[in-house]
Amino acid sequence: GTVVLLVRFADLLPSGPIASRLRPQLISHNDKIPLTTSNLTRFHSRGPPNITIADYLRRIVRYAAIEKSVLLLLLIYIDRICEIHPTFTISSLTAHRFIICAITTGSKALSDIYCTNTHFAKVGGISVVELNVMEVEFCQMINWRLAGSVDILQQYFVNLVRTSSVYATLSPHSKNG
């Protein structure tokens, strides 16, 4: 087996591998996909926000006190929704609203203690009414599959570790451990 050592756990956060999964090249590519009534969702904003995804994630982590595993759940949610709804894309018009909604919902699914929707909405820069409506649509889009098993969370974590330079993996027989 492999032992995963975190060099800096904080680097799992916004500027690290999670934000890189939502990298500007992917967003830019998805922005070129024409909007039609069939691929328009409640997550679409009228225009792109003036905050980077990494800074937006940092803001949420700082002011909403979410558990780190909720960030892994965010990635799981992206994969699940895109699998169920192939026309859904994370673009400059959907990323931020999707992120705040997924983190709000994921916090409720995974944590015993979490912020209110009013607080998440304030942190995310949207109205609580918008967040509530998006949360219902999100739950329906994901077929209410909100939980992430320990095995799935571990799998996503290991995949993040493998693609990041801020982590080290050691075999159990390594002299470095």
Image (spheres, rainbow, N blue to C red):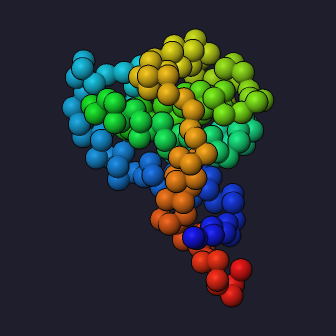
Q: Position of residue 159 (x, y in %)?
A: 49, 59
What residue is drawn where x is 74% and y is 27%? Answer: 115
On the rendered image, what quadrant is the C terminus found in?
Answer: bottom right
Q: Is residue 31 left or right of residue 81?
A: left
Can the viewer see residue 125 in this picture? Answer: no
Q: Is residue 134 left or right of residue 24?
A: right
Q: Which residue ends up furthest to the bottom in the rendered image?
A: 175
What residue is drawn where x is 41% and y is 41%? Answer: 79
Q: Position of residue 12 (x, y in %)?
A: 61, 56
* 172 vs 113: above or below: below
Q: Is residue 133 left or right of residue 86?
A: right
Q: Position of residue 116 (x, y in %)?
A: 72, 21
* 156 vs 130: above or below: below
**Dividing the picture into quarters, in which one does residue 117 lie?**
top right
Residue 34 versus residue 159: which sits nearer the camera?
Answer: 159
| Total marks placed | 0
Residue 85 versus residue 150: which sits nearer the camera?
Answer: 150
What residue is drawn where x is 59% and y is 27%? Answer: 105
Q: Is residue 95 left or right of residue 120?
A: left
